[in-house]
Amino acid sequence: MTNILEELQIILHGVWQRRWVALAVAWAVCLLGWLVVALIPNVYQSHARVFVQPQGVLPGAGAASPLDAQKAIDQVRQTMTSAAVLERVVRITDLGKGASDRDVAAKAAMLRGNLRVMSQQDNLFEITATSSDKSLSGRENGRIAAQVAAGLIRAFQETSLAGGQAETSQSLKFLDQQIAEQARALEAAEQRRVDFEQRNGTGLPGGGSIQERMTAMRTELAQIDSQLLSAQSALAGINGQLVATAPEIVTTGPAGGNAALAQAESQLAQARANGWTDSHPDVQALKRQIDTLQRLGNGGAGGGTRSPNPAYLSLRSIQAERSATVSALQARKAQIQSDLAGIAQRQVENPGLIAEQDRLNRDYDAVKQQYDKLVGDREAVRLRGDAQNEGGAVQFRVIDPPSISSSPASPNRPMLLFGVLVAGVAAGIGGAMALSQLRTTYATTSRLERATGLPVIGGISEVATPRRVALNRTYARWFYAGSGGLAGLCLLLLAVEFIQRGMSA
Amino acid sequence: MDRPPAGKKRATLIERAADIYDFSTALRGAARPVPEARSEPAAEQPAAFVPLVPSWSGHLHPVDRGKLAEEGIILPDGDVTETSEEFRIVKRKVLSAAFGADGLPSARGNFVLVNSAHPGEGKTWCAINLAISLAAEQDLDVLLVDADFGKPAICERLGLPEGPGLMDALVDPQMAIEHAVLRTDIPTLSVLPAGRQVRNDTEFLASDRTRQVLDRLDSCDGRRIIIFDSPPALAASPAAELARHVGQTVLVVRADRTTEAALRDAVNLLGACPVIRLLLNGVKFSSSGRQFGTYYGKTTQ
C-alpha cells in the first residue's frame, strides 16, 4: 500500500517536474480546441408538437394491434420526411424564395438533415427543425427554423389528406378491376360446367355429380319397382273379380222387344213420311234395327231379354285403368334402367369422367368464393373511403405551435469552451505523465538503485540558495501566469460568448 | 582564448600577494626546497597522522564564505545543515572505499573522481561539498583538484586566485606540481587549479606523466584523499581518461533530470574505474513527503 502510494507520489512528482511541458501541451490543445469550437456554426431550433391519429375511427380499419400502431407511426414519420413533403416545405417557406427546381430539390435534401420527427407517445410527434445558415443572423435563423416546422405541419396535412383520397379511389379501381376479372373467370367456369353436362350429364334434371345422379336413379328405380308390384297385385285382384262377375244379366220384361220394334217401325214410317228414300242413312239404320229386333223377337222365345251387367262393366274399366298404370310404371322402369346402363357404359368407356366433373365443380366453387369476397371488400373500401372523405384520412391537431428562438440551441459553446479547457489540462498532465514514463529519470535514491543496479552512496537534497529561490520564484510566477492566462482566456471567451448571446437575443 | 587573461590575472595576483604579505622573497626561496622538505618528514614519521599540517607550502588563501553560502555549499565552520548531514553520510561511504581496514589507501581508492553525465548536474558543487565535508575529518588531508580543463570553476567558486594548475604540470615537465597547490584557510583543504587550457588535454592526461604527477600529489606524510572535479562524461573525453587513474568514481545523478540512457552511457565511458557509485543530487522528492510540496519554500535552516 505504501509502495503504491509512493509510486503515485513519484508519478505526481514527475508530472510536476514537467509542468512546463504540461502547460505547453495544455495551451496548444486549448488554442486548437477553442479554434474548432469557434468554427462550429450556431444551430437554431424550433420545436412543435402535433397529435396525429393515423386512421379514422372505423372499426376494423384502424390500428388494431400494437404492431399495426407502430407501423402507422412509422408511416407518419416517413411521410413527414418524404421528399414530396420536404419539397413542399421548401416551396412554402422562405427557403424556396426564387429557387429553381434543382435548388428546391437540393434544399429539400438539406432539410432532411435539419428536420427531426420523433414520436413521443403513441400518436404525439415532436418536430424539431434546425437552421444554421451562417449568412443569416440569429433572429433570421430562428425564424427560418420556425417557418420550416410550420411548413412541415402544413405540407404534411395537405399531403396526407390528398393521399387518403387518392388511396381510396385507387383501391376501388383496383378492386373493380379484380371483380371484373373474377366475373369473367366465373362465367368461363360455368360455361365449362354446362358443356360438360351437355356432353355427359344426359340432361337429367337436378344437380349433383354423376355418382349422385346414379344413386338418385337407383332409388327411383327401387320406388318404381315397389309401385309396379303393388299395381300388378291390384290388377290381379281386379282380374279375379272380373272372372267372378257375369258379363250379362237376363231381364224378364213384358214386351221389351216388341215395343222397341214397334217404336222403330213408327220411326221408319215417320221417316218415309218425311220423304226420305231407302237410301237415306237414317232409313237404312232404322231398317237394320227393325231387322235385328225382329230376329231377336224371333230368337228369344218367351224367355225375357238379356242386358249387360253394369258391375261387370265398371270392373272392366277399373281393370283397364290398372293395367295402364302397370304398363306406365314398366315403361318408366325400363327408361331409368336404360339411363343407368347408358351412364355406366360411359363410365366404363371414359373412367375420368367423374374426376373431371369434380374438378369442374371445384373450380367453379373457388372462383365463386373469390368473387364473393372481392365484392364484399369493395363494399368495405367504399365505406371506408366515404368515412375518410367525411373526416379526413388522418386526424391532425397541433399541440404546441412552432417555437421561435433567436438564441442558438447548439452548440453549447460555454460548455464546449470549458470542456476544451478541461481537456487541455488533462492532455497536458497526460503528456507530462507520458513523458515522465518514457524518459526515465530518478526521483529517489531507492528508485535509482533499483533501476540501475549500481550502488548509490546517498542523496543530496536540493539546496535552496537565495539565487535559486529567486529563480524558482520567477519561474513559478511565470508558470502561474501561464496557467492563469489559460484560465483567463477561457473566461474571456466565455464572456464574449455570453455578450454575443445577449446581443442577439 | 582564456589563456591571456588567465596569465594576466596570475601575474596580478602574485603581485598583489607580494604586496600584501611581502613574502616574495620567502616564496622564491621556498619554491625549490619543497620536494626535500616534503619527503623528509614522510621518511621520519611514516605512520604518524597526528600533525595535521598540510605538506604544501605557500599562502593560506581564504575561502570566500559568502560565495559558499550563495552557492548553498557547506560552510566549514557553519551550523549543521541538511546538506552537511547528507554529505556526512556520503563521505563515510567514500572513505570506506578509499581506505582499507588498515587505514591505508586501497588501490588508489583515495583518488576520487566526481563526475556526471551532462553539465549542470552538480559535479563541481558536489565535489566542493564533499571536499569541505571531508576536510572536517580529524585525520585527513584533502586535495581538491579541478580537472575540468574546459571550464574550471572551483577557484572561482571558492574565491581562490586562479593560477597554474594540473595541466601546466602535465604540459611542462619542469614544473613542480606542488607549487601549483593552493592552501586555504581551511587547514586540511588544499586546491589544485585546472591550469592552462590546451587543446589536446585528453592526450596529456593519457600520457605517462600523468601517473607520475598524480603520484607526487599522493606522496605525503598523512592520509590524503584527492578529489577530482572532471568535465561531464558525455560532454568531454578527459573524464573517461581520468577514470583510468582513480580508484573510485562518484557519478552525480541529477534527480528528475538525468535520464537512464545518459546514465548508462556515462557508466560505460567510465568503465575503466573499478568502483563507480552514484550520488543522487538535487532530490526534491522524499517518500516521507517531507519536502514534497514545499519546493518553493525555504528549506535551509
Image (cartoon, rainbow, N blue to C red):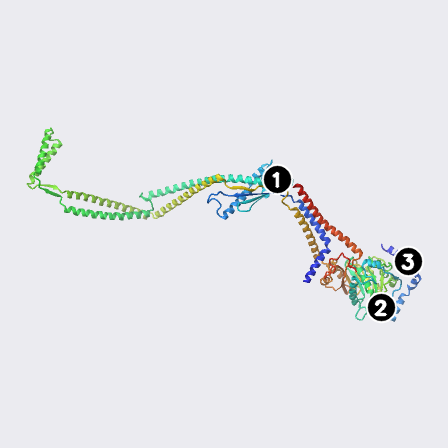
Q: Mark 2 points at which residue?
A: B222
**How far across and how far down the image is residue B24, in percent?**
92, 61
The residue at 14%/47% (across/down) is A244
The residue at 92%/58% (across/down) is B19
The residue at 28%/48% (across/down) is A219
- Quarter of the figure with residue B40: bottom right
Q: Mark 3 is on which residue type?
A: Arg
**How far across and how far down the image is residue A493, in percent?**
69, 46
Q: Which of marks 3 and 1 is in front?
A: 1
Local SS, label 2: loop
Are discs 1 and 2 both within one chain?
no
Say if mark 2 contacts mark 3, CB within 8 Å.
Answer: no
Say if mark 1 contacts mark 2, CB within 8 Å.
Answer: no
- Mark 1 nearby-residue class (10 Å; few <14, some 14–19, many ≥20): many
- The answer for how far apart the CA atoms under marks 3 and 1 are is 93 Å
Q: Answer with left or right where residue B57 lies relative to residue B99.
A: right
Q: Which residue lies furthest to the top in this view?
A: A275
Q: Mark 3 points at which residue?
A: B16
Q: Residue furthest left?
A: A302
From this viewpoint, is residue B186 visible? Answer: yes
Local SS, label 3: helix
**How far across and how far down the image is residue A160, in percent?**
52, 40
Q: Mark 2 is on which residue type?
A: Gly
Above or below residue B47? Residue B260 is above
Above or below residue A90? Residue B232 is below
- The answer for how far apart the CA atoms under marks 1 and 2 are is 100 Å
- Quarter of the figure with residue A503: top right
From this viewpoint, is residue A106 visible? Answer: no
Q: Name the residue under label 1.
A: A143
Q: Which chain carries label 2?
A: B
